[in-house]
Image (spheres, rainbow, N blue to C red):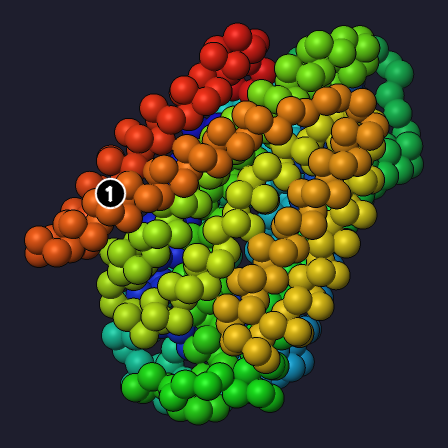
Amino acid sequence: MISAAAAKILGALFKIPLTNVLGGVGMGYFSCAYSLFMPVYALTVTGISSAVARMTARSVAFGMYENARRVRRTAMMIFSAAGSGGSVLTFLLARPFSIYSVGGPEAAAAIAMIAPAVFFGCITAVERGYYEGLSNMYPTAFSQVTEGVVKVFAGLWLCGYVLDNSGALLQRFPEIGDIRALAAAAGILGVTLSSLGAVLFMGIIRLFSHSKKDGEPLVMSRREISKELISAALPIGMSAVVTNLTALIDMWTVIGCISYFGYGTDAPSGVSETELPQFIYGSFAGIALTVFNLVPSVTNMLGKGALTCITSAWESNDRSALKNGTMQALLTSAVIAVPAAFGIGVLSPEVLGVLFPRQPDEVMVCVNSLRLLMPGMVFLCISFPLFSMLQAIGKPSLPLKIMLLGTAVKLVGNLALIPLIGVDGAALSTSLCYAVILVVSLAVYIKLSEVHIPAAPFWGVFYAGVMCGGVAYLVSDVAERNGFGGASVILASAAAGGAVYTAAVYAAIGGRLKRRKTCTG
C-alpha cells in the first residue's frame, strides 16, 4: 500500500509538470497514445500477477516448489509471447489509430514509443505474481517505486530535451510538423523506460533470490498450467479493457463532436481552429481527468481490504459480519470521497490554478468540467468496494457486465451532450455513467447478499460534505477579498472545511464506525 501511494505521487509529479510543458494540444497527442495503449495493456497484463500468485501460493502450500518454478517458467513463456504480440499490435496500429483519433499522423510517434511497454509489463507482472505467491511483497513494492522514479526523471528530461533542441530535431524528423508531438513522444518514451527499469530491477532480484528445493516429484504439466493461467487471467483482463473503454469513448467523441459541431468559443492564442478539438480533448484528459482519478485510487485499496472480510463472512454464513463488513467498506469510501468532491468542486479554479500555473487557457476549459466530474468521482469511489464484494460472494463476472452497461450510458451521453454543451457534456456523461454503475451494483449486491444497508449514515456523510463545501467556499471568498490567492487560499479553505466536516461526520456516524470491527484497514 505504501508503494502504491508512492507510485501515485510519482505519477502526479510526472503528469502535472508534463501537462504544464506540453499544453492542451501536446497532451492530446500524449492522451491519444495512452488511449490505445491502456486497453492493449489491460488485456495482456492486468490479470497476470493474480493468476501467477494464486497458482504459486497453492503449490508452495503443498511443498511443491518445483511446480511453483514451473508455473513461473510457463507463465513467462505464455505472457512474454502475449506481450510481444501486444507490443507489435500497438506499433502497427500507431499510424491508422492516430489518423482516425486526432486528425493527423503526428500522434503516431507517441504511440510507437509506448508500444514496448506492453512486453516489459508482461514480464514484470509474471515476476511480481511469483513473489506475491511466496508471500513476499517487497519485490512488487520496490519495483513499483523504481518504475515511478524512472518515469519522472526520464520522461521529464527527455521532454525538456526535445523542447530545448526543437529546431535540430524537427530537421531530423521532417515528417513530424509539430514539436509538441515530438515532445509528447519523448515523454511517453520515459514511460517505456520506466517499465524497462522495473524489468531490470526484477532481474536483479532474481539473481540474488534462492528458492527451496523440492523433494516432491509430482508436478503439473505445462498444458495444465497454461490452461489454468489463461482461464484465470483472461476474465480479469477483459474487465480491465471495459474499464478503459471510457477513455477511448472520450477521445473519439470529444474530438469528433467538436470537429463536426464546433465549440462555440474562439481558439486560444497559439491554437489554430484545426487544432482546437485536440486542444479541448488534451486539456480535459490531461487536467480534469488527472485530478478526477486521484481519490478513486485510494478507495480501490479499500475494496481490496474488504475482499477477504466479505469472503470469510459469506462462506461462514455470518450475516452480522457480512453486514458490518459491507457498511464499513461503503461508509469508509463515502467518508473519503464526499469531502474531496465538495472541496475540489467549490475550489476548482484555485486547485487547477495551483497545479497547472502555466496553462491558464487549458484550466479555463476544465473548471466546469471538473465540477461536473465530482459526483461521478463519489459514485466511482463507492463502486470499487462493491465490485470487490460482488467477487467475494462468488459473482466475479457481474462487474464486467455492469461496466458494459455503464460504458453504453457513457457513449450515448457523450454523443447527446457534447454537441449541446461541449466538453462539459463528456464530464456530465461520466458522472451519469458511474451513477448507473453504482445504483445497479448496489441493487444487485443487496439482492444477492440479502444485506440491509440503511441510508441514514450516508445522508449524514452527505450533509457533512455540504457543510464542508460551504465553509470552504466562504473561507476562500473571504481570503480572496483580502488579497490572498493560490495555495494559501486552498490551505485555509481545506483546514476550515476539514475541521467542520470532521465534527459533522463524527456527530452523524462516529459512534457507528467506532462500534464496528474494522475490516478495510
Vertical placement of 141 versus 413: above or below?
A: above
Question: Looking at the image, which is closer to me, 370 or 218?
Answer: 370
Q: To which quarter of the image does residue 261 belong?
A: bottom right
x and y percentages locating residue 296 in the rendered image: 52, 42
Residue at 78% from the left image edge and 16% from the top image edge: 314
Residue at 49% from the left image edge and 79% from the top image edge: 278
Q: To which quarter of the image does residue 448 belong?
A: top right
Could you tell me the amino acid type at mark 1?
A: Ser
x and y percentages locating residue 331 in the rendered image: 55, 27
x and y percentages locating residue 470 in the rendered image: 33, 44
Q: Is there any visible trace of residue 42 in the rendered image? A: no
Q: Determine whether the residue tagged by mark 1 lies in a helix, strand or loop.
A: helix
| Circle 1 residues within 10 Å: few <14, some 14–19, many ≥20 | many
Residue at 55% from the left image edge and 50% from the top image edge: 376
Task: Tell me if 66 is positioned left or right of 114 in this view.
Answer: right
x and y percentages locating residue 508 in the rendered image: 45, 22
Vertical placement of 103 versus 400: above or below?
A: below
Task: Tell me if 425 is positioned left or right of 269 in this view.
Answer: right
Question: Looking at the image, which is closer to me, 372 or 70?
Answer: 372
Mark 1 sits on what residue? 493
Vertical placement of 426 versus 379: above or below?
A: below
Question: Looking at the image, which is closer to me, 85 or 270?
Answer: 270
Q: Is there any visible trace of residue 300 in the rendered image? A: yes
Task: Tell me if 447 is positioned left or right of 428 in this view.
Answer: right
Vertical placement of 134 versus 498: above or below?
A: above
